Image (cartoon, rainbow, N blue to C red):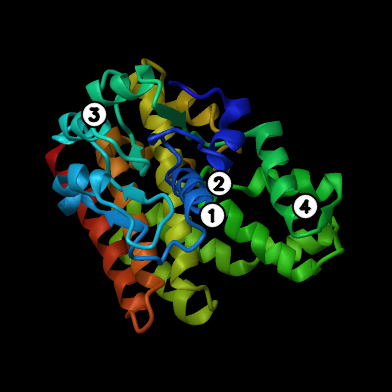
Amino acid sequence: MKVSPRNIGATLQAPGNLRVIMLHGDDVGLIRERATTAAKAICPDLHDPFRVAMLGRADHARLEEEMTALSLTGGRRVIWLREGTDEGLLEALKRGLAQQSDALVIVEAPGLDSRSRLRGFVEKDAQCALIGCYPEEGRALEGAIRQMLAAQDVGIDPDALGWMVERAGPDRAATRSEVEKLALFAGRGGRLGLEDVRACVGDAAGVSMEDAAFAAMAGQRREADAAAQRALTVDGSSPSNLTRALMSHIHRLRRARLAMDAGMSRADAMRQLQPPVFFKRTDSFGQALGLWPADALLRAAQDTQTLELACRQTGSPDIVLCLRHVARLCGLAQQARRRR
């Protein structure tokens, strides 16, 4: 069944007898956040190997087996499947649902086409929930930020909230990261004013990260390398923050690219983005739009999400991984330019 926006929170926090929750859409960060909420509703300890099974692309063949496995320690199991596609999953899911089990299958399926047979099946089956995850804007984004801060017992002034909404990108993970930084700054019971938000969010390091993201997607290798190096070694930005800046930019490019594919002009596609592209960056944004098709942008977003997870691993050479990823994005853009 398809879950309406107003019922999403209740469904995730109390899945009840649902056996499958599929999360699709453009906001990879929101997909991951909602998948985590649903998983914790069943098993608060996501590191429990007896009750939680993580299935990457290479493990999709194990879906039916995991759906029917018993929990050795009691309680419902969670099968968390990432990079869900139509390839082989539909039949395995049907066979698993035909057998007795109380396990909850959570499928992350960013970019799954509306004509997908897998998506159509989940939408019609009463045991399944289909949830769209798209970037929030305007009042919806304001409400989400207020809710995140309220969970930390932190208030925010209207002008500060408005300024932050204008700066927020389309990726939920990046927004949550900024909100967590603000909550830490304010402390429990605190209140954020405009100057507080500007001090925490509008730092110079963000400019270097944006420079790196824009240059990388436009295939400007020298500029991208220099900006990424500056952000990571001079400005003190963390590799995770750089990956989120890349993710935000890639998602905005994909939204504009999809609008162009639907018949909108490049200028109009860029103009309809909220917040609008900064006028000094319109040339770079437009160049990238001409180089990257929508499916390639989705792959770039997924690869960047994988990079962020890798950067969080203890002992990971995160700076090297980030610089290598920026170089790879530049290379893909340059290849696309040569093919034109």
Instruction: List the residue tagged with mark 2.
Output: 169
Closer to the chain start, of discs 4 and 3, is: 3
Q: Secondary structure at mark 2?
A: loop
Which x, y percent locates residue 326? 31, 62
Out of 162 and 119, give the one closest to the viewer: 119
- 252, above or below 214, in the image: above
Residue 150 is labelled as: 4
Give me the residue at 46% from left, 76% from top. Answer: 232
Instruction: List the residue tagged with mark 3.
Output: 98
Give me the residue at 34% from left, 49% from top. Answer: 80
Label pair 4/2, CB-CB below 8 angstroms: no
Q: Name which quarter of the figure residue 4 lies in.
A: top right
Crowding around mark 2 (Cα neighbors within 10 Å: few <14, some 14 to 19, many 20+) is many
Q: CA distance from mark 1 to mark 4?
A: 18 Å
Label pair 1/2, CB-CB below 8 angstroms: yes
Which x, y percent locates residue 274? 59, 35
Q: CA distance from mark 3 to mark 1?
A: 39 Å
User: On the rendered structure, is 262 left or right of 163?
Assistant: left
Q: CA distance from mark 2 to mark 3?
A: 42 Å
Give me the residue at 31% from left, 42% from top. Answer: 297
Closer to the chain start, of discs 1 and 2, is: 2
- Labels 1, 4: front one: 4
- Labels 2, 3: front one: 3
